[in-house]
Amino acid sequence: MKFAIVMFALIAVGSAAILPGGDASAETLRNDATVGIDSFQYAYETSNGIKAEEQGQLKTIGTEQAIVTQGLYSWISPDGQTFTLKFVADENGYQPVADHLPVAPASSK
């Protein structure tokens, strides 16, 4: 399980290159990571305005174990607008929240 947590954290940190606003010449300004037996957290920031942070812990749900996470990603678009996406990923699925995401119309029941 520890291997899975470490791999998840490394993949998440590496995802900075594929976020909108990615820049091959960007420098890492901050890169913090802590990986434990049943939890992890990381945070990074690059010179082109990409920021991310995430925390996760092992949770027992019924008879199963799963990693429950929460965090955020932030980037600057080419026109200078900052976008931030916060999320939770748990037994209820991936739940993103951001001002730029479309919202389903209210049900009229």
Image: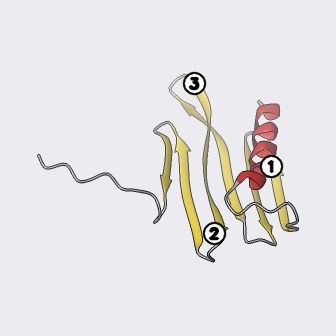
Q: Are marks 3 and 2 in contact (CB under 8 Å)?
A: no
Residue 83: percent from left, percent from top: 58, 68
Q: Residue at x 56, y 60 (%)?
A: 85
Question: What amino acid type is highlighted by mark number 2?
Answer: Ser
- Front position in the image: 19 or 37: 19
Distance between the Cα atoms at labels 1 and 3? 28 Å
Determine which quarter of the picture holds residue 71: bottom right
Residue projecting furthest to the top? 63
Q: In the image, 82: left or right of 97?
A: right
On the image, the x and y values in percent for residue 29 come to 85, 71
- Give the residue type that dot 1 points to: Gly
Relative to the observer, which residue lies in front, 104 or 6?
104
Q: Which residue is mark 2?
A: 77
Q: Which residue is mark 3?
A: 64
- Label 1 CA crowd tier, 10 Å (few <14, some 14–19, many 20+): few
Q: Amino acid at mark 3?
A: Glu
Which one is in front in this view, the residue at disc 1 or the one at disc 2?
2
Q: Which mark is residue 82?
A: none
Please tell me whether mark 3 or mark 2 is closer to you in this view.
Answer: 2
Residue 79 lies in quadrant:
bottom right
First in sequence: mark 1 vs mark 2 = 1
Element marked by disc 2: loop
Q: Which residue is mark 1?
A: 14
Q: Quadrant of the N terminus?
A: top right
How many numbered badges does the structure rendering display?
3
Which residue sits at x=77%, y=32%? Answer: 4
